[in-house]
Image: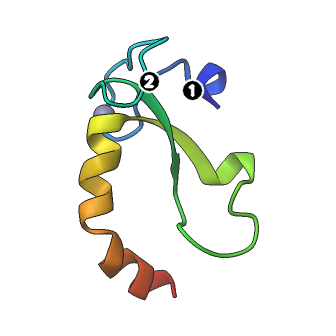
Amino acid sequence: VFERDGYRCHLCKRMTKRGAVVPHPKAPVIDHLVPLGPGDDAMHNVATACFMCNSKRRDVGPAQLILFG
Ligand SMILES: [Zn+2]
């Protein structure tokens, strides 16, 4: 997924830091576009995000879970 997206965060459109690991705010992480349901790990349901954006999204997670639940 990182290679497909060119290591670019799909939320802030900035480049993640290739090789950085997760405590680093610019570390590349896999973001699930639809949090729950079948095909959760399908390639079209995942996108590259930086750890900082992914953490922010997780803050509003419960609302999204209700929305998609
Ligand atoms: Zn980002």
In-image side of 20 versus 56 (left or right): right
Image quarter (top left, top right, bottom left or bottom right) of the N terminus = top right
In-image side of 51 versus 38 (left or right): left
Disc sitting over residue 14 in the figure: none
Q: What residue type is labelled 2?
A: Arg
In-image side of 26 versus 69 (left or right): left
- Spatial separation of the CA atoms under disc 1 and disc 2: 6 Å
Residue placed most toward the observer, 24 or 3? 24
Where's residue 53, x and y in %?
A: 29, 42
How many numbered discs, if any? 2
Q: Disc 2 designates what residue?
A: 8
Instruction: Confirm whether residue 23 shows in the render.
Output: yes
**Quick check: 35 above or below 10?**
below
Badge 2 marks a residue whose secondary structure is loop
Where's residue 27, x and y in %?
A: 39, 24
**Residue at left 52%, top 88%?**
69
Mark 2: few/some/many CA within 10 Å (<14, 14-19, 20+): many
**Quick check: 26 above or below 1?**
above
Q: Disc 1 designates what residue?
A: 5
**Quick check: 57 above or below 16?**
below
Q: What residue type is labelled 1?
A: Asp
Where's residue 3, x and y in %?
A: 64, 19
Examine the image and state in which quarter residue 43 appears.
top right
**Residue at left 40%, top 87%?**
66
**Residue at left 68%, top 49%?**
44
Query: Within the displayed image, which quadrant is ligand 1 positioned in?
Result: top left
Contact, mark 1 vs mark 2 (Cβ under 8 Å): yes
Badge 1 marks a residue whose secondary structure is helix
